[in-house]
Image: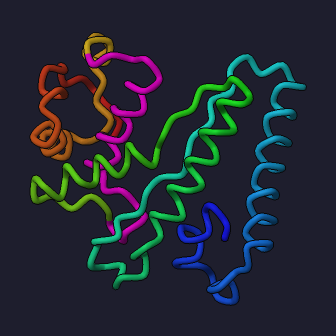
Amino acid sequence: GHEDGALLRTPMPPGFENPTDAALDAALARYDEGLTAMVEALRSRRVRTVVLFGPAAVDELEPASAGVHVGYNATLRAISNRTRDFAERESLPFIDLHAITSSVYGRMRAAGAQPTEDGRTPTEAASGLIAADVLHALGVSRDQLGQVTWRPCSEPTYAAARAIDASLSALEVGEGVD
């Protein structure tokens, strides 16, 4: 069977519930072709730095999603791994947004906070935590964020985010973006 087959089979869009190995191979080949075309187009335009991101995770536990996302993270993880492998082959930086969002959602649930509105859309607090983790993955330290008085959301929400991620507590509260 196909290496990613077990992951990519559940859930799938209507009509693709039981794809053949050949169909999965074709879909993954098209994904790689799309990444290649995008990177080649950016390089041809002399874009200095291309950073690839894996897809964000979904919150499979969000009650508002009525279970529609259950199992989908396996598919998103496989796509993220595929993107990471592509980035390595092309010597491009890669940000594992799937791992970042999974971690943020888990930390928030552990703290009793709601990470998403609908299973897909991060809450304001989750967005702030995700942004901090993405900036950190890009090489921006928490100290650097504090030096620019970085605050990605409104004060009540930022206070909630600081309660979940103590490293944000050391940051000064600046004007931020609401």
Is 162 magenta? The answer is: no
Residue 139 drawn in magenta: yes
Q: Is residue 13 left or right of residue 75?
A: right
Counting from the top left corner in percent of width and height, residue 169 is at 12, 27
In the rendered view, does 72 fall on the left or right side of 3? left
Indicate the quadrant where residue 46 lies.
Answer: top right
Q: From the viewer's perspective, is residue 66 above or below residue 61?
A: below
Residue situated in front as seen by the camera: 30 or 47: 30
Q: How is the image coloured?
A: rainbow
Q: Residue furthest front?
A: 1
**Farthest-out residue, right:** 44
Vertical side of 151 occupied by 114: above or below = below
From the top left corner, tell me how far across and down residue 114 is, in percent: 21, 62
Of residues 133 and 103, the one drawn nearer to the viewer in this rendering: 103
Residue 118 in the image, given as x and y percentages of width and height: 36, 71
Residue numbers of the magenta segment: 117-142
